[in-house]
């Protein structure tokens, strides 16, 4: 079938595949470096306890068959190695069927991790990586030109990411309709970046233009992905430009990066495609069968997207083949942060020498400027932002976090930027307090050197020790 392939997207496919493989590397690296204190055998939400109560059919993956910390570490580092090989182009050296199997490996491996990751892996970009990664299995290698069907399925994912996010904004917080949400967003977003302070201080008319441009990019431009060239390329380029703006203004893990990856499915890049034979019949049949299956499964996310009760960031099947996306349907007007402190005093008092733990990404010391971490995902820092919104988000993991800090647990401390206590002298008591944070003004920044100003709100956790009967979060 001559219509089946699109040789003019040869370069675009190459960039898309290498970029996606790089995202896989970052994802597996984060899993390898953070799993022990989060979901390990002594983690805050241990995998062995999870697989005891959740059946395989609801969360399929290898860890239902066997789990140990050593096995998980080997699994995650192997995922890094396979993904790095894909970045280097190993799939281009294999026959078509071998390349497809190679691309299937990181998808299967990361699916196993996400399906036991619980709260720590409940973010929309986890499902987005899996949905995109599954489609790229059928994108082919150097033996065949890119299949049109797969390219359009990738565009369809991008459409749902952007259009779904646009709809949930218009249906959600009125500040999106009044063009005022960015008066608050840069200050209250989960993890500010090094330039977020400056974005927040842009004039309010600029913020209005930003919001209007966001609505245009998410509600109008996605439709143009399915139009003829060069309009589709222009639409994809505009989406990439918008995602670049989000990358420099905040830290959203690999959400923006994988959205850029998806945009290359519509972006026609220059470069001559080599002569390739026609796609094998078995390959055409497989791609068309998978496409039909995914389109059938995709009815549920479509119904959700057009529903007045639209939900965001939810998977509709345990394999994460089709999902719904969206973010910031509502915007916080005030930023709260949970500050965790410890003391070595035998009797905790208000005037005790309380020393604060510093996290890597989330605000703490008002004088410490935010840093850029994305596309790397600091999972504990993100959940601390949710915990500050409501103690209900802390659940059981926050209690275990406090216990591990009281033990000076080595793996838990590695999640932090700094512990104020020596390894051989853990604190006697831990407490947590809720503060309101706001960006300083230009004058305050010049005078104090601090980018944040904070005000005490209330206690989040009273002074707690290991043998205390009252360990609430």
Image: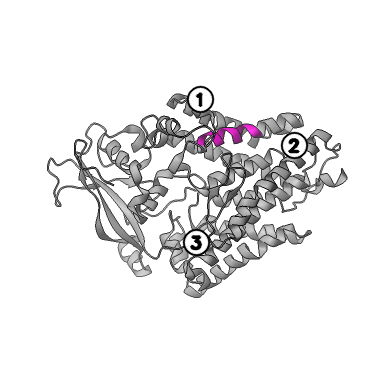
Q: Nearer the viewer, mark 2 or mark 3?
A: 3
> What residue sits right under mark 3 in the picture?
329
| Residue 85 picture location, percent across and down | 63, 32
Number of residues whose C-alpha sits closer than 10 Å to that of mark 3, classed few (under 14), some (14–19) or many (20 or more) = some
Number of residues whose C-alpha sits closer than 10 Å to that of mark 1, classed few (under 14), some (14–19) or many (20 or more) = few
**Which of the 4 image quarters holds residue 100?**
top right
Q: Is residue 304 magenta?
A: no
Taking the spot 29% from the left edge, 45% from the top edge, the residue there is: 357
Q: Main secondary structure of the magenta part?
A: helix
Q: Earlier in the sequence, mark 3 or mark 1?
A: 1
| Residue 336 picture location, percent across and down | 34, 58
Q: Are marks 1 and 2 in contact (CB under 8 Å)?
A: no
Q: Nearer the viewer, residue 143 or 288?
A: 288
Figure label count: 3
| Residue 97 picture location, percent across and down | 74, 30
Q: Which numbered circle lies on residue 141? A: 2
The magenta stretch is: 104-113
Secondary structure category for the residue under label 3: loop
Residue 451 visible to the viewer: no
Give the distance between the C-alpha atoms of the residues marked 1 and 2, in whole angstroms: 33 Å
Taking the spot 19% from the left edge, 39% from the top edge, the residue there is: 468
């Amino acid at each position: 079938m001559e219509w089946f392939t699109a040789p003019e997207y040869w370069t675009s496919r190459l960039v898309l595949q290498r970029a996606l493989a790089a995202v896989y590397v970052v994802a597996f690296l984060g899993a390898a470096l953070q799993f022990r204190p989060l979901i390990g055998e002594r983690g805050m939400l241990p995998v062995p306890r999870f697989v005891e109560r959740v059946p395989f059919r609801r969360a399929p993956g290898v860890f239902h068959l066997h789990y140990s910390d050593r096995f998980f570490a080997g699994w995650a580092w192997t995922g890094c190695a396979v993904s790095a090989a894909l970045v280097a182009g190993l799939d281009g050296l294999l026959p078509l069927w071998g390349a497809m199997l190679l691309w299937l490996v990181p998808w299967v491996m990361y699916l196993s991790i996400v399906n036991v990751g619980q709260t720590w892996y409940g973010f929309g970009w986890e499902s987005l990586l899996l949905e995109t990664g599954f489609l790229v299995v059928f994108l082919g290698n150097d033996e065949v030109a890119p299949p049109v069907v797969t390219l359009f399925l990738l565009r369809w994912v991008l459409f749902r990411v952007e259009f779904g996010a646009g709809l949930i904004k218009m249906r959600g917080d009125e500040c999106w309709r009044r063009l005022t949400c960015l008066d608050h967003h840069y200050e209250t977003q989960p993890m500010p970046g090094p330039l977020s302070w400056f974005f927040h201080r842009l004039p309010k008319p600029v913020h209005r233009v930003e919001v209007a441009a966001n609505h245009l990019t998410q509600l109008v431009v996605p439709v143009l992905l399915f139009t003829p060239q060069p309009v589709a390329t222009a639409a994809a380029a505009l989406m990439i430009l918008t995602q670049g703006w989000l990358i420099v203004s905040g830290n959203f893990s690999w959400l923006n990066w994988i959205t850029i990856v998806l945009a290359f499915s519509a972006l026609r890049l220059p470069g001559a495609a080599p002569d390739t034979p026609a796609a094998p019949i078995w390959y055409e049949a497989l791609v068309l069968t998978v496409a039909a299956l995914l389109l059938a499964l995709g009815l549920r996310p479509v119904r959700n997207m057009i529903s007045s009760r639209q939900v965001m960031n939810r998977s509709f099947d345990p394999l994460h083949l089709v999902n719904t996306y969206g973010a910031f349907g509502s915007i916080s007007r005030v930023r709260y942060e949970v500050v965790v402190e410890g003391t070595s005093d035998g009797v905790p008092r208000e005037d005790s020498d309380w020393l604060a733990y510093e996290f890597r990404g989330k605000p703490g010391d008002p004088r410490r400027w935010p840093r850029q971490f994305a596309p790397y995902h600091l999972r504990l820092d993100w959940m601390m932002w949710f915990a500050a919104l409501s103690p209900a988000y802390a659940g059981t993991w926050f209690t275990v976090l406090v216990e591990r800090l009281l033990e000076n647990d080595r793996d838990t401390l590695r999640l932090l930027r700094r512990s104020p206590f020596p390894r051989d002298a853990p604190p006697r008591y831990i407490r947590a307090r809720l503060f309101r944070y706001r960006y300083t003004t230009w004058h305050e920044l010049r005078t104090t050197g601090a980018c944040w100003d904070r005000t005490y709100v209330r206690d989040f956790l009273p002074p707690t020790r290991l043998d205390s009967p009252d360990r609430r979060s």
